[in-house]
């Protein structure tokens, strides 16, 4: 089993009492991060240590700070529409070594589940748009991967996913949300509901009290980012790794400014911050609004009951409401049959997760949980 800190994602804070005033600034990414499963298997990448030019460009049309999904997608779409523009991408560490290079590779649109919460906070119209946006992005991801011929290169697999309700309160909640979504005109046809007995059989989880099925996919996150950036390099993208942006001085009355780094400064007509959890370091107005929230996942080698012809055909989210009010996720990679399992957050103190950016270490209690969660929590049987 391989354990690694997974994503240090930006998290819209709802627990301000857990943060001290002097901890609002997330700082820069850790100097000595560990390697996740995804990163440890790609040490031959030609983007490692890449600096397209020895010196930083003095001036560019667009500067992008951060090289995960957001940064690479920004570069891809911008250069696709503006092939003659100058673009520099600045990364404080190596390409895609932050949250994107550490998450589970689970591409799973929210087809219904968050609807009532979104509606309560945003209203019906905007809530429906949120779900539509999730589905459009899911389809756009597949379109880009297909059109660019990246399916095999990034281990992209389209499949179905189970939302498994592991207690009755969760099952009742899922059905209530799905009914409300359907009643308000949401595209509920994307979701198939299984009642308890059918769910137990389909998911192989004996505690299942119900399950929803809807479209999903899985991929190798780092490889996708690198593939997109390689396309951008051919269009003139300038990549500068190990070059943290320490300050941005905005232009007066404009959208651009000057980016300061230990290697010099760059003047940019436009600047895109794609730093996620670290946004508050350069954009102080976001301190206390976007807060780092740490996760962990593991790569687990399955036993015979989940190997070969008995491999799982769907990805999973296991959810509890009555006791834990939390979830785990799991994918089985068709390429090698290994499991990627994430979650288990109720096993540790939330203060070890919220406002934490140290991705150089793992959390021991989460590591222990992942060692036994398949037989103890999901499938309730001997997995030897």
Image (cartoon, grey):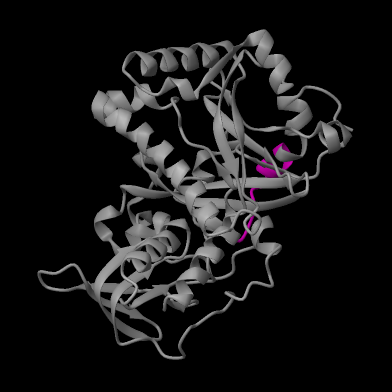
Instruction: Name the residue at the bottom extreme.
Output: 54
Q: Is residue 168 above or below residue 287?
A: above
Q: Residue at x 24, y 56 (%)?
A: 285
Is residue 366 magenta-colored?
A: yes
Q: Is residue 56 left or right of residue 100?
A: left
Residue 291 in sight: yes
Q: Is residue 244 above or below residue 155?
A: below
Residue 307 in picture, x, y percent from top left: 84, 37
Residue 276 in picture, x, y percent from top left: 40, 55
Query: Which residue range is magenta in the image?
Result: 359-369
Is residue 87 magenta-colored?
A: no
Residue 31 in picture, x, y percent from top left: 54, 70
Q: Is residue 75 left or right of residue 121?
A: right
Residue 186 in picture, x, y percent from top left: 36, 22
Q: Residue at x 81, y 33 (%)?
A: 306
Residue 36 in sight: no
Q: Residue at x 41, y 38 (%)?
A: 134
Q: Is residue 112 above or below residue 344?
A: above
Q: Is residue 318 left or right of residue 285?
A: right
Instruction: Examine the image and state in which quarter residue 205 appears.
Output: top right
Q: Is residue 346 left or right of residue 277?
A: right
Q: How many marks?
A: 0
Which of 214/44 is in front? 214
Instruction: Examine the image and state in which quarter residue 57 appears.
Output: bottom left
Q: Is residue 355 above or below residue 181?
A: below
Which of 209/223 is in front? 223
Q: Which image quarter is the C terminus in?
A: top right
């Amino acid at each position: 089993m391989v354990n690694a800190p997974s994503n240090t994602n930006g998290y819209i804070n709802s627990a301000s009492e857990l943060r001290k005033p002097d901890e609002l600034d997330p700082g820069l990414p850790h100097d000595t991060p560990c390697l996740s499963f995804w990163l440890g298997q790609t040490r031959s990448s030609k983007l490692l240590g890449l600096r397209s030019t020895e010196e930083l460009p003095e001036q560019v049309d667009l500067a992008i700070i951060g090289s995960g999904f957001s940064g690479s997608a920004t570069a891809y779409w911008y250069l696709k529409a503006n092939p003659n523009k100058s673009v520099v991408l600045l990364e404080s560490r190596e390409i895609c070594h932050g949250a994107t290079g550490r998450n589970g590779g689970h591409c799973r649109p929210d087809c219904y589940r968050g609807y009532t919460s979104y509606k309560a906070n945003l209203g019906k119209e905007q809530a429906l748009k949120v779900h539509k946006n999730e589905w459009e992005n899911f389809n756009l991801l597949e379109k880009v991967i297909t059109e660019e011929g990246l399916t095999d290169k990034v281990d992209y697999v389209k499949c179905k996913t189970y939302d498994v309700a592991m207690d009755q309160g969760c099952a009742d909640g899922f059905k209530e949300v799905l009914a409300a979504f359907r009643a308000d005109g949401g595209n509920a046809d994307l979701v198939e509901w299984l009642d308890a007995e059918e769910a137990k059989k389909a998911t192989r989880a004996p505690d299942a009290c119900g399950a929803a099925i809807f479209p999903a996919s899985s991929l190798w996150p780092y490889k996708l980012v690198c593939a997109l950036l390689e396309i951008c390099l051919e269009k003139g993208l300038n990549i500068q790794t190990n070059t943290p942006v320490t300050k941005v001085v905005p232009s007066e009355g404009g959208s651009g400014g000057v980016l300061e780094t230990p290697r010099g400064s760059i003047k940019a007509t436009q600047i895109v911050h794609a730093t996620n959890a670290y946004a508050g370091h350069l954009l102080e107005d976001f301190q206390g609004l976007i807060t780092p929230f740490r996760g962990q996942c593991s790569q687990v080698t399955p036993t015979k009951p989940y190997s070969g012809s008995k491999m799982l055909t769907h990805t999973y989210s296991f959810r509890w409401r009555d006791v834990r009010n939390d979830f785990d996720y799991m994918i089985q990679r068709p390429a090698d049959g290994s499991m990627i399992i994430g979650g288990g957050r109720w096993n540790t103190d939330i203060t070890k997760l919220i406002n934490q950016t140290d991705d150089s270490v793992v959390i021991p209690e989460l590591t222990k949980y992942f060692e036994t969660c398949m037989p103890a929590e999901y499938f309730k049987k001997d997995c030897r």
